[in-house]
Image: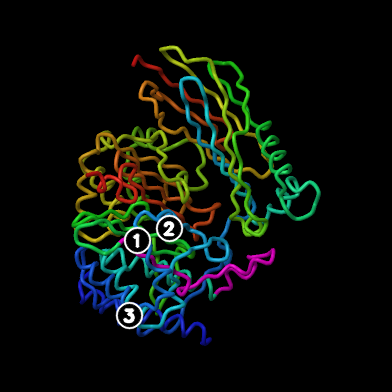
Amino acid sequence: MKRSALASILILLVTLAGAIAAQPGPAAAVPAANAFLAMLEPGERAKAAFPFNSPQKTNWSNLPNGIYQRNSLRLGNLTPAKRSAALAVVAAVLSADGYRKVTDIMNGDEVLRGAGGGQTGGRGGRGGVTFGAAEYYIAILGTPSATTPWMVQFGGHHLAINVTIVGQNNVITPSLPAAQPAKYTLNGQTIRPLGKENDKGFALIGALNAEQRKQAILNYRVSDLVLGPGEDGKTIQPEGILATALDANQQAMLLDLAHEWVGILNDEGAAARMAEIRSNLSRTYFAWSGATENGGLAYFRIQGPTVLIEYAPQQGDLDHIHTIYRDPTNDYGARLLVP
Amino acid sequence: MSAPIRLLHLLTLMTIVGFGFPHSTEAHRLDEYLQATRISIELDRVGLEMNLTPGAAVADTVFAGIDQDRNGTISPVEAAAYARLVITSLKLSVDGRACELKVDGSAFPQLADMHNGEGIIRLRASAKIPQSAIGPHRLAFANTHRSDIGAYLINALIPKDGRIRITSQSRDTLQNEFKMEYKVNER
């Protein structure tokens, strides 16, 4: 095994070991963030700590390094202990499933790197595109606090996690979990970072009757996210079938599908966000474009007053999935910040 | 996250013996020229926001159409000329009357980013329309720019003016053409 691959695996081991020490929930994230910041040298701290209202708040993307400039602190530049502390902060604001999804996406990018991804990119003298588990960045915006607003931002290629915390309230919008490869093997196990999203989406469209499908299925191709990175503050006209046209079981499937994104956040925060989505079902739409048999190529969208979720395979490639989760009323905690 | 779950995850990874590799090694858009348009409707104006993303495999041909002097960079004059070229490929009408679009702004990426298939050209354009009377209206939009390689998205934004309510939308299969009906209500 190449030395670089071993180093990357070591990064994962160390960071996950650090995550074990963390405790869940926004309150527990405060000591984790303070412990991480306290470990940093001044130069590292300058890259990790930002004012809460810094422009860094919207500086995220699905793109890899070499194409997109992230100004925060790169995991690959940290000692194992500091990487561990950084990942402990991320783990503290996420659920168990959410943290596993994050590591699955990072491991997938390591697979992409190992397969030679990025070697053809970066022409024009700007350096190559870089993939791998070391190419993820963390930022703390504001002062970690049990009362005043602060934010944890973590991401890299195919991943953007933005958790805004105000006391015991917190949101994870906007966030972008994506995957390439969408399926890989690790330690003999098949990993599908967004497999449940795919399968639950197909299960829901499969559960609709012919009349419901007429309403849900768009008659046109959707080849990418409509409101991806850089499209903050926009709300598109909803389409598809209204959730009130679904029966109780189908509504439960819709909520369970939405939870795949909402539930990346810690359990307390996710429960609050799901309650909002549930209370707005009468104004929530489910739209579908593409094949209806699992294994085919399909785009889908869930859109309601407090949720926009898009799932979009890229350019006909089932092995390359982009998704986005937004809350039109609460991206970056906008609603939590209203006095 | 509970400590036992994290420990299980850790123990799983501690026995790593290797990764399985995927078939594809490219992370970016390849042979399509993605053109995403968002339409905003106001009482006396239609606004367009366009994100144009040439895939890595077609970036050279798109760039050649912009870099007229072939010096490897996009000058303001070349950017303005390309923005006008794109606009000429668009057709917009409201209530059956053709609308004249003008470019309000543009931003072009670095050549290297276009080569990677992730450079986004951003255009803003708008058209003034006669003050919309109370009642139903219809808007039609079509984009035929680089239809040989184009992949299209067209979406209407929810109107910021609460008097305007979109009542229906339709598109062709490839999203070259978009039609929308909307209603202007009394204040």
Residue A96 in the image: x percent, y percent? 26, 67
Give the residue at x 28% y 65%: A97
User: Crowding near pointer 3: few (<14 within 10 Å), some, many (20+)?
Assistant: some
Front tag of 1 and 3: 1
Dot 3 and dot 2 within a common chain: no
> Marks 1/3: CA distance?
33 Å
Q: Is residue A338 left or right of residue A300?
A: left
Q: Nearer the viewer, residue A247 or B18?
A: B18
Subunit of label 3: B
Residue A141 circle label: 1
Q: Which residue is mark 2?
A: A56
SS state under label 2: helix
SS state under label 3: helix
Subunit of label 2: A
Q: Which residues are magenta?
A: A115-142
* Labels 1 and 2: the sequence-earlier one: 2
User: Crowding near pointer 2: few (<14 within 10 Å), some, many (20+)?
Assistant: some
**Which amino acid type is marked by label 2?**
Gln
**Which amino acid type is marked by label 3?**
Thr
Q: Which residue is mark 3?
A: B12
